[in-house]
Image: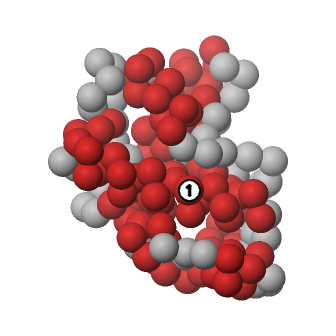
């Protein structure tokens, strides 16, 4: 298994987009996620976390009925929940990277991400941290240990 490309986040939107990919992927082919990503990005207003955090039932219904996205209502709701939590964590810690680094290392961060954010299991949380450039165990070794290879 090849490691996914890493990014250098410059905004909270970059973090929300990376987390949202990890949210949509479980149970769905990466090819499908990539094919639908332009529509997903548009539906979630380029992953502006403050805009997404304000979504209500009308926006959720519109996205759920949009054929250009993956129409899993639970995953759509998870993105909105995750946007709200990101905004809260940024406010509480001064920045989202400060939140990520406030747990004493990878294991603590992984555990808290899984607790705070929806549809972010162990592999999704690892993937998210890896993609956004946080310190994580070696990708290939981690995948082999966790049956992801």
Q: Residue at x 55, y 21 (%)?
A: 142
**In what quadrant of the picture does the N terminus appear?**
top right
At 56% from the left and 63% from the top, the residue drawn is: 80
How many marks the image carries: the answer is 1
Q: Which residue appears farthest toward the front when viewing the image? A: 57
Residue 16 x/y as whole percent: 45, 59
Question: Residue 144, relative to residue 135: is it above or below?
Answer: above
Q: Nearer the viewer, residue 20 or 146?
A: 20
Side (left or right) of 148 relative to 128: right
| Residue 71 spot, x, y in % from top left | 79, 70
Asked if residue 123 lies left or right of residue 66, the reply is: left
- Residue 26's place in the image compared with 48, above or below, is above
Image colouring: secondary structure
Q: Return the residue found at the far top.
A: 145
Q: Nearer the viewer, residue 4 or 57?
A: 57
Q: Is residue 13 left or right of residue 52?
A: left
Residue 144 shows in this picture: yes
Q: Check disc 1 and report the residue beneath it.
A: 81
Q: What quarter of the picture does the C terminus occupy?
A: top right
Identity of the residue drawn at 27% across and 31% down? 101
Q: Quadrant of residue 37?
A: bottom right
- Asked whether, in this view, residue 134 is left or right of residue 74, the answer is left
Check disc 1: other Cα within 10 Å, few if <14, some if 14-19, many if 20+: some
* Residue 110 position within the rendered picture, expressed as x and y whole percent measured from the top left: 48, 27
Mark 1 element type: helix
Of the pair 8 and 59, the residue shown nearer to us: 59
x and y percent of residue 13 in the render?
38, 65
* Residue depicted at x 55% and y 75%: 55
- The answer to whether residue 38 is visible is no
Image quarter of residue 58: bottom right
């Amino acid at each position: 298994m090849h490691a996914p490309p890493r990014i250098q986040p410059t905004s909270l939107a970059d973090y929300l987009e990376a987390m949202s990919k990890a949210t949509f992927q479980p149970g769905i082919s990466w090819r499908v996620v990539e094919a639908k990503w332009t529509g997903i990005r548009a539906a979630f207003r380029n992953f502006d976390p403050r805009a997404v955090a304000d979504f209500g039932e009308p926006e959720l219904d519109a996205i759920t009925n949009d054929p250009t996205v993956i129409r899993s209502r639970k995953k759509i709701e998870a993105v909105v929940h995750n946007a709200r939590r990101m905004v809260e964590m940024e406010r509480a810690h001064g920045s989202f990277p400060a939140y990520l680094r406030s747990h004493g290392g990878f294991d603590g961060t992984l555990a808290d991400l899984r607790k705070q954010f929806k549809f972010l299991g162990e592999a999704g949380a690892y993937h998210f941290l890896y993609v956004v450039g946080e310190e994580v165990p070696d990708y290939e070794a981690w995948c082999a240990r966790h049956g992801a290879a």
